[in-house]
Amino acid sequence: MSNVAVIGSQWGDEGKGKIVDVLSREADVVVRFQGGHNAGHTLVVDGETYKLHLLPSGVVRKNKLSIIGNGVVVDPKALLWEIDNVKKQGIEITPENLMLAENATLILPVHPALDIAMEEARGAKKIGTTGRGIGLAYEDKVARRGIRVCDLAHPEYLKERIENMLAYHNAALKGMGAETLNTIDVYDELMGMSDKILSFSGVTWKAIDDADKAGKKILFEGAQGHFLDVDHGTYPFVTSSNTVAAQAAAGAGVGSKKIGYVLGITKAYTTRVGSGPFPTELEDDIGETLGRKGHEFGVSTGRKRRCGWFDAVLVRQAIKTGGIDGIALTKIDILDDFDEIKVCVAYDLNGKEIDYLPASTVDQANIKPIYKTIKGWKGKTQGARSWSDVPGDAVKYIRYIEELIEAPVALLSTSPDRDDTILMQDPFNS
Ligand code: IMO
Ligand code: MG
C-alpha cells in the first residue's frame, strides 16, 4: 500500500479534480500542496457539478480530512467565499474536515492588484495569468516579505508586516499608474476574517504524520500541470510554483518517500489556457471541434482554452522529469468521432529532429511537431466502464500512447462522471 500524488502532465486542466474524486473514495486524507485559487477542479457527482479552486477535492466526500498545505498560497477572502459557495450545494466545511497549514502564505489584495497591473504593462507579451495574485504572493514568500496564516493571531506583528509589504509594493503600483493600498484598510479587512480563518488553521504536517502512523491513505492533489512548473515548464509562461510531485513533500511537510505512486493526469489531446508556446496547437476547425466537444473553457476564468493534438514528446518529458509512475488518460471520448487522429512523436527544430522540448522560449516557438497519423475508431468510448466496452482501435491508440510515453495507462476516464472510469492499476496498491 502506498500514498498517491495526482499531478497534471500537460498545461493544467487535464481532469485532476475528477480523478482525485475517484481516488478519494479510497483515501482518508486529501492534501493540496502548491498553487492557489488559480486552479479549477471540476467534479461531477450524481449529476451535480462542483467547481473547486482552493479546497481539496476530497471535501465532497464524507469522513475525509482535507488539508491545505504550507506550499499553497491562500487568499483568505477566496477561501471563505468558496466555503460558503459549496455550502449552498450541501457540503459542510468545518474545522473537522478542513485544516489549513498555519505556515501557508496569504494572498493579500495587493497581489491581484499588482498581478493585473503587471499583465497590463506587458501588453502583447502578457503571460495570461489568472489575475489572482498567485505569482506575486510566491514572490513575496521567497523575498521573505510574505504574511502567513499564523500571523493573523498576532495583530500588532501583522500590522507591521503589512506596512513593510505595502511600502515595497505601493511604489510599483504608483509607477504603473495603479491605485495604491493603505495598511489600515488591508489590516481591518484581514482582522474581519481572521477568527474564521484561524478556526481552520493547524499544524498540518502533524496531522499528516498522525494519519500516516495510523496507516491511513494520503492523496496529494496537485494543481496546474508539468509545463506550468516554474523549473520544468515553458518559462516564463508558467505559474510561480513547482507543480511536480516532488513538491508534495515540501508543500505538505512530509518526507519524499511518503509521496508514493505518482499518477500523471493526461488529456487524450492537449490544451493550454493563457499565452506561451504550444507546438501542437490547432488554429483550425479541428481545434474548434476539440474545444466545443471537450467544453474547453477555464473553470477559474471562463477563458477559451487553446486546443491541439496529443503531444507524446511533452508527456514523456513530464514522466521522466516528474517521476510519473503511470497516467490517467482523460477525455478519450472527445476523440470518438474523428476519421483520423494525429499524435506528435518528435519535433523539428530548424531542420533537425529532436525528441525533447528545448528550454529556450525562442526554440520552443520555432519547433514544428512531427506527427504520426492514425485511423480514428469512430465508435463510442464515452461512458465505457470496462475494458471490453472500448472499441479495438481506441485500445490501439491507448497502447500506442503507452509505448511513446514509456509509462502505463493506469486509469481511463470516459466522461466527467466519477463512475465512468476504468481502473487498470490501483495506484494505492501498486
Ligand atoms: P488547474 O489546477 C490551466 C495558467 C494561467 C497562465 C499561467 C500563470 O485547473 O489545472 P497564474 O495565475 O498561475 O500566475 O498564471 O498558468 N494556469 C492554469 N492553466 N489550469 C490551471 O489550473 C492553471 N493555473 C494557472 O492560465 O497561463
Ligand atoms: Mg482547471
Image (cartoon, helix red, strand yellow):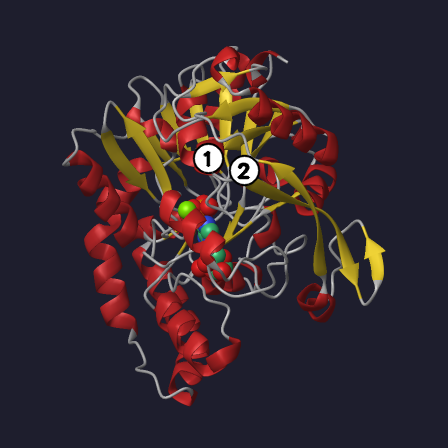
Residue type of the residue flagged with mark 2: Ala
User: In this picture, is 199 found above or below 24?
Assistant: below
Residue at x 50%, y 47% (from the top left corner): 12
x%, y% of residue 34? 50, 45
Left or right of 292 on screen, residue 49: left
Evaluate if marks 2 and 1 touch, with contact meaning CB atoms under 8 Å apart.
Answer: yes
Left or right of 182 on screen, residue 246: right
Q: Residues within 10 Å of mark 1 (few under 14, many from 20)?
A: many
x%, y% of residue 345? 73, 45
Work out whether residue 147 or residue 423 is closer to the camera in this orientation and state it.
423
Q: Is residue 17 visible?
A: yes
Residue type of the residue flagged with mark 1: Lys
- Is tag 2's residue or tag 1's residue first in the polypeptide sequence? 2
What residue would you read off at disc 2? 268
Badge 1 marks a residue whose secondary structure is loop
User: In this picture, is 266 found above or below 167?
Assistant: above
Q: Tell me the quadrant of the picture where the C terminus can be found.
A: top right
x%, y% of residue 247? 60, 41
Left or right of 381 on screen, residue 77: left
Residue at x 61%, y 63% (from the top left corner): 277
Distance, label 2 to label 1, CA atoms, is: 6 Å
